[in-house]
Image: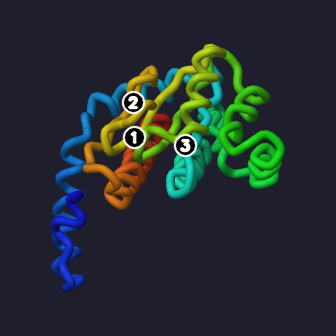
Amino acid sequence: MNNIDRFFSQDPATFAKSYFNYLAEVLKGIDVQEIGRFVATLLDARERGATVFFVGNGGSAATASHFANDLAIGTNSYEKPFRVLSLTDNQAIITAIGNDFGYHDIFVRQLRILGKAGDVVVAISASGNSPNLVSAFEYAQSAGIKTVAITAFDGGKMKTMADEGIHVPTGPKEYGPAEDAHMVLDHLVGAYLMRLVNN
């Protein structure tokens, strides 16, 4: 039984209070040094003109899009921008690759065209075991592209194979708190970088 099942209540107000309390515990459990290393990686990529690619599935695909928007556009840095793309956003490309080659290739085939040595790929996944993200990491490592895993649960394969990462310590299958925390990371990092580069 995961934590959400454990504290579930028929009363929505009671459930909301328990959910918020648990989410606060999860956020407190994130290693802020991991966040610091991630920010340093983003700043290094910006300095070098490297591209940062975000990838994810389902809710994490939406987070990938949001992260890319907040870093590339939200930081308002145009003379020296953060070059950030979400590889989840072009449905024509994703469906073409998925149809012709298989869903497991939807990110690898984009990285083969757009990525270059020195770039960064950030994969967002609660489980850390999505085959298309693991494949993207395998390709990235072979191509000299740095890998960053933003995970939850036990971190899965991505946590062990990534060059670095931010782990959100939730119980298994706690997708809500995991994805909530991933969005908090997006807004935290975006808020910090926007102020840093514009001061």
Q: Quadrant of residue 145?
A: top right
Extreme residue toward the bottom, this view: 11
Q: Give the CA distance from mark 2 to mark 3.
A: 23 Å
Q: For numbered disc 1, what is the local secondary structure?
A: strand
* Residue at the (79%, 28%) spot, across then down: 113
Hey, which quadrant is residue 68 in on the image?
top right
Percent position (x, y) of residue 176?
36, 61
Q: Is residue 106 visible?
A: yes
**Does dot 2 land on a helix, a strand or a loop?**
helix
- Using the image, tell me which numbered label, if any, was put on residue 151: 1
- Whether residue 38 sits left or right of residue 27 in the image: it is right
Q: Which residue is mark 2?
A: 159
The amino acid beneath tag 2 is: Lys
Give the labeled residue for mark 3. 71
Label 1 near label 2: C-beta < 8 Å? yes
- Residue at x 23%, y 66% (from the top left corner): 5
Under mark 3, the amino acid is Leu
Q: Is residue 178 above or below residue 54?
A: below
Q: Amino acid at mark 1?
A: Thr
Q: Which quadrant of the figure has residue 106?
A: top right
